[in-house]
């Protein structure tokens, strides 16, 4: 009997393999092969932008032994974590209000929240540059009101990076949390209110635990996007800040040290993969606890 079941299953498996083969072939050709070539190139040296023959570990020794690179890693992870925290704190109330809105108004609110995503990141970041520059709108208003004696440095540093990046990635957090809040059964909140639970207790005992998957997915999404962000850190932070993507850009297109830039890219890839692996584990734990 088992052999007959196996023989019946084989044609189905063969059809599935036939349909999946083009996808796996494309992934292998356009993802696995280029990635393998990049990894191989990171073990070489370069001269005037030309990758030389001969294998070496000098690039990885440099990026793991020098204190400046550990400062870059720490500041990159710190900035990404801070922006993720700000997006969660600012995004949760907006998502909660969006969930309580009427059916007529809710589609309009969804559109207004998602509308910034339709605008190119370069355009949005340039808008923040016009606002935060020394001669920008914010400094001009503060100077005219007499609140400042001289223009404040709101761009070209981590202040501009954090302000601009929070606005750029905030819609991802709001939409992720709103999706989880919409799945909460309203009868749970009504029951808690009837039993005399205060709004604070309802928030910590019902809303936040049930919305945790959305907060987690939004946090991972914002954190990983911020890790690999390039346009916003470069335009609002400039090359003066210690940020991993900016360092990769500097090594690749300014110093022309492509192997070291690729080695730094591998570090970024490992960090992003670790974040998603952590999300998968935490999500399983949340589902198990629920």
Image (cartoon, helix red, strand yellow):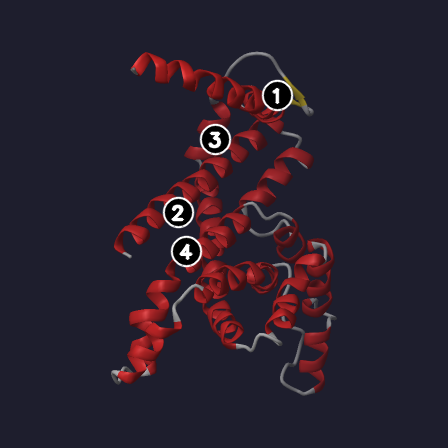
Sequence-first tag of 3 and 4: 3
Element carrying mark 2:
helix
**Residue 143 x, y percent position in the rendering:** 69, 82
**Residue 18 x, y percent position in the rendering:** 56, 19
Q: Within 10 Å of the Cα at label 4, are there few (<14), some (14-19), or many (20+) other Cα atoms?
A: many
* Pointer 3 with pointer 2, Cβ within 8 A: no
Q: Disc 2 marks which residue?
A: 279
**Residue 123 x, y percent position in the rendering:** 74, 58
Marks 3 and 2, how far apart at CA: 30 Å
Q: Which mark is residue 216?
A: 4
Marks 2 and 1, how far apart at CA: 28 Å
* Pointer 2 with pointer 4, Cβ within 8 A: yes
In this view of the protein, can residue 261 be seen by the observer?
A: yes
Q: Disc 3 marks which residue?
A: 62
**Residue 215 x, y percent position in the rendering:** 43, 60
Marks 3 and 4, how far apart at CA: 34 Å
Q: Which mark is residue 29?
A: 1
């Amino acid at each position: 009997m088992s052999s007959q079941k196996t023989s019946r299953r084989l044609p189905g498996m063969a059809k599935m393999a036939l349909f999946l083969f083009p996808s796996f072939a494309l992934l292998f050709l356009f993802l696995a092969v280029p990635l393998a070539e990049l990894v191989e190139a990171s073990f070489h040296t370069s001269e005037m932008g030309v990758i030389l023959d001969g294998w070496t570990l000098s690039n990885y020794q440099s990026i793991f032994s020098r204190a400046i690179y550990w400062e870059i890693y720490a500041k990159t992870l710190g900035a990404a974590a801070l922006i993720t925290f700000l997006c969660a704190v600012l995004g949760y109330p907006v998502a909660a209000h969006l969930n309580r809105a009427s059916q007529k108004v809710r589609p309009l609110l969804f559109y207004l929240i998602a509308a910034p995503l339709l605008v190119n990141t370069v355009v949005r970041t340039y808008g923040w540059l016009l606002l935060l520059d020394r001669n920008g709108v914010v400094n001009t208003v503060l100077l005219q009101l007499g609140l400042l004696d001289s223009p404040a440095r709101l761009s070209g540093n981590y202040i501009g990076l954090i302000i601009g990046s929070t606005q750029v990635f905030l819609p991802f957090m709001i939409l992720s949390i709103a999706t989880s809040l919409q799945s909460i059964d309203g009868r749970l909140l009504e029951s808690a209110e009837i039993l005399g639970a205060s709004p604070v207790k309802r928030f910590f005992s019902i809303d936040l635990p049930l919305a945790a998957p959305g907060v987690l997915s939004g946090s991972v999404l914002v954190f990983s996007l911020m890790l690999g962000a390039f346009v916003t850190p470069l335009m609002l932070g400039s090359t003066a800040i210690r940020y991993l993507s900016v360092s990769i850009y500097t090594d690749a297109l300014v110093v022309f040290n492509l192997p070291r830039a690729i080695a730094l890219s591998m570090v970024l890839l490992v960090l992003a993969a670790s974040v998603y692996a952590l999300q998968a584990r935490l999500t399983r734990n949340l589902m198990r606890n629920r």
